[in-house]
Amino acid sequence: MPYFKVDPVTDPPAPQFFEGYSFDLELSQWRSIADVADSILLSPKGPMDKYGAFDNPTYFLAFNSKIEWNLNEEETKRLQAFMGYLKHKILYQELAKKPQWFLEPK
């Protein structure tokens, strides 16, 4: 998961980084992301799988002194969906703004 080390509410504007790209967040965007993160962290947790998530990526979400990681299939799906949400909300919009470089065939 991305790590935002600057608080856009109290700190001066500074670029944020996600998947190697830098960007600025508007306060409304940050609040929207924070609301989704809080809803994930406050949602009921299922039982831990006996052997954990086998052959799955590991996801970790820490926000407002709360932590969650995928200990079962349900949490894996929820955190994967959050990662997809962040990519659509931030990354893909930023990629669309970047200039495209095309190589001409020889």
Image (cartoon, rainbow, N blue to C red):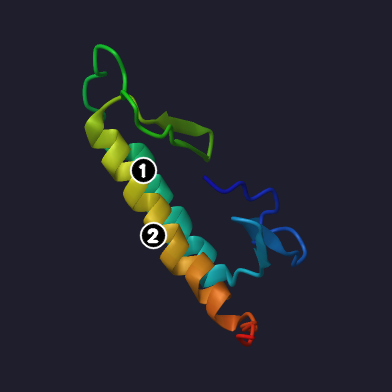
> What kind of element bears circle 2?
helix
Q: Is residue 20 left or right of residue 81?
A: right
Q: Position of residue 20 (x, y in %)?
A: 65, 57
Q: Is residue 48 left or right of residue 12?
A: left
Residue that sits furthest to the front in the current view: 106
Q: Nearer the viewer, residue 75 or 100?
A: 100
Q: Tell me which numbered mark, 2 or 1, is placed earlier along the sequence.
A: 1
Q: Amino acid at mark 1?
A: Leu
The crowding category of the residue bearing disc 1, from other C-alpha atoms within 10 Å (few below 14, some 14 to 19, many at least 20), is many
Q: Is residue 44 among what the camera can see? A: no
Please state if 91 lies on the left or on the right of 39 as rendered. Answer: right
- What residue is at 36 percent from the left and 30 percent from the top? 70
Classify the position of the C terminus by image quarter: bottom right
Of the residues shown, which amino acid type is indicated by label 2? Tyr
Within 10 Å of the Cα at label 2, are there few (<14), some (14-19), or many (20+) other Cα atoms? some
Quarter of the image holding residue 88?
bottom left
What residue is shown at x 57% (from left), y 69% (from top)? 27
The residue lying furthest to the top in this view is 50
Task: Give the residue drawn at x 43%, y 32%.
Answer: 58
- Is residue 25 in view from this perspective? yes
Compared to residue 37, the image places residue 98 above or below, namely: below
- In this view, the residue in front, 66 or 69, is 69
Q: CA distance from mark 2 to mark 1?
A: 10 Å
The structure residue drawn at horizontal position 24% and vertical position 18%, both measured from the top left corner, is: 49
Residue identified by numbered label 2:
85
Q: Give the tally of numbered discs.
A: 2
Which residue is tagged 1?
79
Asked which secondary structure carries label 1, the reply is helix
Residue 77 in the image, given as x and y percentages of width and height: 27, 42
- Image coords of residue 61 (percent x, y): 47, 38
Q: What number is the disc on residue 25? A: none
**Height in image: 62 above or below 46?**
below
